Amino acid sequence: MAAKISPEAAAEILETISQISYSLGFSGGLRPTQWTALRFFANTEERARTVGNFARYNKTSPSSASQTINALVARNLLERVQVEVDRRSHRLGVTAEGRKMLRSDPLGHLVEAIKEMPEDQRFDLADHLQFLLIRMLDRFEEGKGKPSD
């Protein structure tokens, strides 16, 4: 690996990793966004498992998030659970079939690659990625690259 790398070359490497990871997300009959939704609802505390929270997390519109969720409900990977205190509201939960599906989550390919790194490099990677994520979220929130409906 080169000792010095330009910002453009680093960005291209990140983009390539992202594209490979995205492509691997078309597995198990699901799309990458559906895998993201399954992971979100499996790893989020119960009170936060709503369409709106998933839409915010995934940086998408509520209607797009609803379409993703409806597809997972139709496949019996997610289920709607009525909120006791407000019968008009519901939360979403991962079904047993959804948990089974998550055992073959394609994100595991990236996880395994990261596990091959020495621990100190993983910590450095996490710090650098967090820095980039914050900067990119700032740009996203400023309207540069905001998704359109």
Image (spheres, helix red, strand yellow):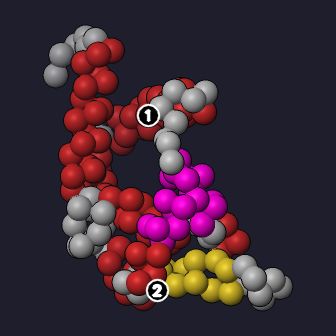
Q: Is residue 113 visible?
A: no
Kindly indicate the quadrant of the structure image that contains residue 4. Answer: top left
The three-letter code of the residue at mark 1 reads Leu
Residue appearing at x 64%, y 77% in the figure: 91
Q: Is residue 92 above or below residue 39?
A: below
Q: Is residue 144 visible?
A: yes
- Magenta span main SS: helix
Q: Which corner quadrant holds the N terminus?
A: top left
Crowd band around label 2 with a 10 angstrom C-alpha radius: few (<14), some (14–19), many (20+): some
Residue appearing at x 67%, y 66% in the figure: 48
Magenta extent = 51-69
The three-letter code of the residue at mark 2 reads Thr
Which residue is label 1 attached to? 129
Q: Position of residue 84 (x, y in %)?
A: 78, 88
How far apart are the two marked residues, 1 and 2, measured between alpha carbons?
32 Å
Residue appearing at x 63%, y 61% in the figure: 52
Q: Secondary structure at mark 1?
A: helix
Which residue is label 2 attached to? 95
- Which mark identifies residue 85? none
Query: Is 54 within the magenta?
Result: yes
Kindly indicate the quadrant of the structure image that contains residue 9. Answer: top left
Q: Is residue 109 above or below residue 5?
A: below
Q: Position of residue 100 (x, y in %)?
A: 34, 82
